[in-house]
Image: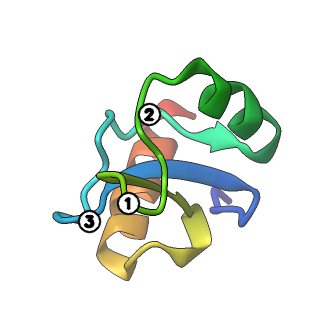
Amino acid sequence: MTKLYDTDFVILNKKTKEPIESLDVVYSSLSLAEFLNSGEYQVTPDGDYEFVSMTKLPEGLQNRYLKQLRKES
C-alpha cells in the first residue's frame, strides 16, 4: 500500500497552499539541507514558500499525492 511519511516534504506556496513543483517531486528529510543551501527558492519565515511534511498537508492535497504515487508504482 502506498502511504505518505512525515519524513518526506514538499514545497508549498504560502499564499495558495499549492505545491510549486509537480506532484512527483518530494524531498526526503535528508535532502532538505542540500536544497536549502542551493538557494533555489526563498524558504524563510518571511519568504513565499514553505516546506510541509506530507502528513501535514490538507487531506485533499494528500489524496492528490497518493494518486500520483500509485500511478508511478
Note whether 42 is above or below 9 in the view shown: above
Q: CA distance from mark 3 to mark 2?
A: 17 Å
Q: Is 36 situated left or right of 5 in this image? A: left
- The circle drawn on residue 37 is none
**SS of the residue at dot 1?**
loop
Quadrant of the snapshot with the C terminus: top right
* Viewer-nearest residue: 36 or 53: 36
Few, some or many residues within 10 Å of mark 3 (<14, 14–19, 20+): some
- The circle drawn on residue 17 is 3
**SS of the residue at dot 3?**
loop
**SS of the residue at dot 2?**
loop
Query: Mark 1 = which residue?
Result: 46
Quadrant of the snapshot with the N terminus: bottom right
Mark 1 or 2: in front is 1
Across and down, in percent, residue 71 comes to 42, 38
Few, some or many residues within 10 Å of mark 2 (<14, 14–19, 20+): few
Mark 3 or 2: in front is 3
* Viewer-nearest residue: 65 or 37: 37
Q: Amino acid at mark 2?
A: Asp
Across and down, in percent, residue 37 comes to 66, 26
Q: CA distance from mark 1 to mark 2?
A: 26 Å
Q: Earlier in the sequence, mark 1 or mark 2?
A: 2
- What residue is drawn where x is 49% and y is 46%? 70
Query: Mark 2 = which residue?
Result: 24
Q: Amino acid at mark 1?
A: Asp
